[in-house]
Amino acid sequence: MINVTKSNFISKIYFNKIYQLIISIGKFEKKKIILDFGCGLGGLKKINFEKKNKSKIINYDIIQKLSDVTKYNNINFDTIVFCQVLYLFKTKKIIMLLKKLKRQNKNLEIIVVYSTQSIVNRIFAFFLGHGNAHNNTVTTPEEERELLLNQCYLINEINYLNLFRIIRLKFK
């Protein structure tokens, strides 16, 4: 099932905070090309543009009308962002994707945002009208983190109120 979160006033604040932290941890003020994999409605690109950063963000989503490109593997990028998207993939698919990305660019920087899916998240999601926010979870936050740390070195991490974590990684 394809899932795009349509934000309301409060969830827009929540996602804007995530995007600001991604931009900060990823040092987007420097000139680089970033692929926002699973970009959804393109909030990260909008916030980055508003901040007038030097980085260029290319949106890619399974929903073609949300994407800037039809195939992400035809472009060169320095950083890839997975913002609350890997939980929708089976672990084997995540491993295959990481191996493919490593072959493409062994120096690739990876930024992953994942919800902790805690009880606080569920309450928060319910009151925001997104009560089914994690119903399609295929890979748990713990599995996602372990899988990423098996493939990559941790550079930096932000734990935001135990609602979500942002990790910045490089391939081993």
Image (spheres, rainbow, N blue to C red):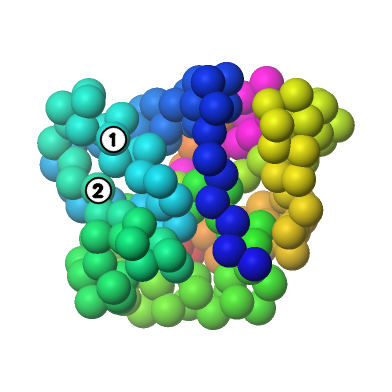
Left or right, residue 116 beside residue 44: right
State the mark number for residue 14. none
The x, y position of residue 52, in whole percent, is 16, 27
Report whether residue 162 is seen: no
Name the quadrant of the N terminus: bottom right
| Residue 38 in the image: above or below residue 27 | below
Amino acid at pointer 1? Lys
Amino acid at pointer 2? Ile
Residue appearing at x 41%, y 52% in the figure: 39
**Mark 2 neighbour class, 10 Å CA radius: few under 14, some 14 to 19, many 20 or more:** many
The x, y position of residue 103, in whole percent, is 36, 79
Q: Main secondary structure of the magenta part?
A: strand
The x, y position of residue 50, in whole percent, is 22, 26
Of tags 1 and 2, the one toward the viewer is: 1
Residue appearing at x 13%, y 36% in the figure: 54
Report whether residue 75 is seen: yes
For label 1, the residue is 46
Residue appearing at x 21%, y 70% in the figure: 75
Left or right, residue 19 beside residue 146: left
For label 2, the residue is 57
| Residue 160 in the image: above or below residue 130 | above
Instruction: Say if the magenta span includes residue 165.
Output: yes
Residue appearing at x 25%, y 48% in the figure: 57
Instruction: Say if the magenta span includes residue 163.
Output: yes
Please, what secondary structure does the residue beneath circle 1 have? helix
Whichever of labels 1 and 2 marks the residue nearer the N terminus, that label is: 1
Q: Quadrant of residue 73?
A: bottom left
Q: Quadrant of residue 30?
A: top left
Q: Quadrant of residue 24?
A: top left
Q: Which residues are magenta?
A: 159-169
Of residues 41 and 120, the one nearer the viewer is 41
